Amino acid sequence: MFPTNSLIFLICVLSFHSSITQAQKVIEGVSGSELDTGWTLINGALVMFMQAGFAFLEAGSVRSKNVANILLKTVMSVAISTMSFYCIGYGLAFGDTKTETRNGFYGNGSFFLLGDESLHVFFFQWSFAAVASTIVSGAVAERTNLSAFFMCSFLMTSFVYAPVAHWMWSTTGWLSPFNKEMFRVGTVGVVDFAGGVVVHYVGGICGLVGAIMVGPRIGRFVNGKAIPIDGHNKTLVLLGGLILWFGWYGFNAGSTTALSNGLSLISSYASTNTTIAAASGAIMSMFWSCLKSGQYDLTESLNGCLAACVGITPICAFVQPWASVIVGATSALVYFFGVFVLESCYVDDPCVAVPIHAFCGAWGVFLGGLFATKEQIIKLYSLDSDLSVYGLFYSGNWEMVAVNIFGIVIIGLWVAFSSVIMFYFIDLTIGLRVPAEDELVGLDHKYGGSAFNVEDEEYGYSATMKSQRSGGQTTKSGGGSSRHRNVY
């Protein structure tokens, strides 16, 4: 009699073979363009998942009395920037449908996606725009009016971020390597493959302006001295950071928006370089923080990892793996320098968003002028094979360095100028900052509801305030709490 186990094994083998055969038939029936579309959609979803990373990281970086507020800001930042990008931003960034008015400075069509069937492109680019908006949230955390931030998300996505995306990534942008028809600065343009400047630098500079205009948190600087205000949960910070690292593969490798025509190799470079740079940045930060304080620091090691991810973002597709080690390590050092500069200037950034995103985003684009390889630049941007403008260390040509620096400066000026106008308008109409008493008690009290089911006294509420809110009697519970208490 045929053994039962052998029969089961045979059935499994035959089923597996049948599944493989069917899968091969499906793959053979998929065209290159369909595969590229699927690749773009999957990576757009990965970038969207980074919002969970931002939520965890920012929630852990603030005090427990502000957690629900920062989480609500993250959710609404995505929702509001979505509507902003759908209505206005995508058209200004990539709407080049009206030939007679095409220009290098802003798009002129595809508003509300009318007449545009490239929905996978919209989806992918939307995920990037949402990240830029969320970066601002961390820089102005714990003291900003929630309604003011909502308006900031809408205006920033439409009128600050979108023009830069057009300049750098559209087929007509005046700084874009993809521009083959109209005026473009330099032989190649400003090379920013995955958004070191377009997303991170723009979000970081906007956050810097916001942090300056809203002012520091109460107690952050006392008598000219910076007083650390630690976040309440390093576990959340670590989880958020690792989710961001994971999502970065969609951010960087997915920016090819295709796998066909040899672009799978570019994606492979992007993934590998992102991994190596992140590891290099984490190790450098760990040792640097140990030199400063005499002990290893979890938060600083993670911040160094994220700084390296930002630094490698604009150039991950066209540098060699050995260069990504240098990019990651130096980006971590740039992060520490950025923290020092902000504290010296009395700028309060609770989530260190500005040093990580603005400083390291610009640094990565600068390094692209040094390390960009000829073959990958030609492949990625469909340039002539006799190209003489690529990384200085290979070509001896300074043009790419100079053009990239020009792009950093001009985009920085634009974002700073437009952000000042935006935040001034918001402050004039809504008001940027919450009242001091709300800030001291915690923004969850009034602008989002408590994130934790514990006694209100834990968050600075008095028993009287609780009684007034509930309309009933309250009693104080005895005993201590194992939760971290806030320092006001």
Image (cartoon, grey):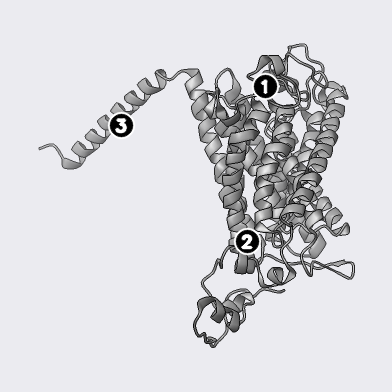
Q: Position of residue 433 (x, y in %)?
A: 74, 60
Identified by mark 1, the residue type is Leu
Few, some or many C-alpha atoms within 10 Å of disc 3 (few <14, some 14-19, many ≥20)? few
Spatial CA span between label 2 and label 3? 45 Å
Q: Nearer the viewer, mark 1 or mark 2?
A: 2
Of the residues under marks 2 and 3, which one precedes in the sequence? Answer: 3
Q: Position of residue 249 (x, y in %)?
A: 59, 38
Circles 2 and 3 in contact, beta carbons < 8 Å: no
Residue receiving disc 1: 380
Query: Disc 3 or 1, which lies upstream in sequence?
Result: 3
Determine the residue positioned at 80% across, 35% down. Answer: 411
Q: Viewer-proximal residue, 10 or 219?
A: 219
Q: Against 101, is 194 above or below? A: below
On the image, the x and y values in percent for residue 107 come to 68, 25
Q: Judge depth for marks 2 and 3 and give the one in front.
A: 2
Q: Nearer the viewer, residue 49 or 68?
A: 68
The residue lying toward the viewer, choosing from 202 and 386, is 202
Residue appearing at x 78%, y 54% in the figure = 211
Q: Quadrant of the N terminus?
A: top left
Secondary element type, mark 2: helix
Q: Is residue 315 visible?
A: no
Residue 173 visible, this angle: yes
Name the amino acid, label 3. Phe
Residue named by callout 3: 16
Residue visible at 78% across and 31% down?
Answer: 368
To which quarter of the image does residue 381 belong? top right
Q: Position of residue 322 (x, y in %)?
A: 73, 35
Q: Are marks 1 and 2 in contact (CB under 8 Å)?
A: no
Please name whichever residue, 429 or 410, is drawn nearer the observer in this view of the structure. 429
Q: Nearer the viewer, mark 3 or mark 1?
A: 1
**Which quadrant is home to the C terminus?**
bottom right
Query: Which residue type does callout 2 highlight?
Result: Gly
